[in-house]
Image: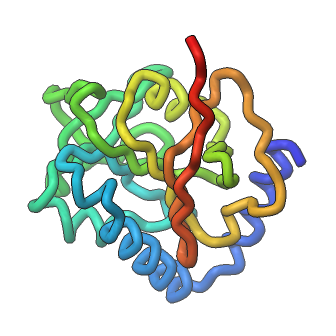
Amino acid sequence: MNKNDIRTRVKARKNLLSEQEKADAAERVFRRLEQSAAFMLADRILMYHSLPDELSTHAFLRKWGKLKHFYLPRVNGVNLDILPYDEQTLALGSFHIEEPQGTDKANIGDIELIVVPAVAFDKCGNRVGRGKGYYDRLLASTRATKVGVGYDFQFCADEDIPAEPHDVALDIVITESRCIVVHKRRQLR
């Protein structure tokens, strides 16, 4: 199955979810994230501010925003800038996503954990995004632990997602009922 087929299948499944199912799933997924060693040990965390069709991050950001140093991405051309999370300074930006405002950009090298949205994930940590490559460009420049979060049906348990050379795999995938730690082969250089 190609990435566009996966996007179509997942979008159709998301459209069937009630608001209560969405809220319950987000609560279960982010409870799993909270209990992970990766989250417990990290202080500087890049999150995402969810769109209506994504697993909602809003309650999680409010819950932990004063206890951890959260950052959000802001689209800058074909790249993402990273700015501190402050709910009071969010404004509608590119692609109708609420983004942080200001000039206080963070260095990706200072981020310890990145929570990544996606359309789908597989057991190898491969992901299908929205197709613009923003996260792949950002993830390629960091050693931070990369965690993908999503609904159970976004996890492709029985198939591998096609990966291209520029795609960056995740370290952990968390869904409502799973926490998959990806064991990658060490690449020789």
Please tell me which residue lies in front, 179 or 93.
Answer: 179
Question: Furthest residue to the left?
Answer: 66
Q: Residue at x 23, y 50 (%)?
A: 42
Q: Is residue 2 left or right of residue 81?
A: right
What colouring method underlies this structural image?
A: rainbow
Please tell me which residue lies in front, 69 or 78.
Answer: 69
Question: Furthest residue to the bottom?
Answer: 20
Question: Furthest residue to the right?
Answer: 1
Asked whether residue 69 appears in the rendered view, the answer is yes
Asked whether residue 54 appears in the rendered view, the answer is no
Q: Is residue 18 left or right of residue 90?
A: right
Against 118, residue 152 (above or below) is below
Position of residue 97 measured from the top left corner of the image (x, y, whole percent): 42, 48
Residue 168 position by quadrant? top right
Against 123, residue 102 (above or below) is above
Q: For the image shown, how many numbered marks are present on the structure? A: 0
Against 94, residue 115 (above or below) is below
Q: Is residue 74 left or right of residue 174?
A: left
Q: Residue at x 86, y 43 (%)?
A: 2
Q: Residue at x 56, y 71 (%)?
A: 178
Position of residue 115 measured from the top left corner of the image (x, y, whole percent): 41, 50
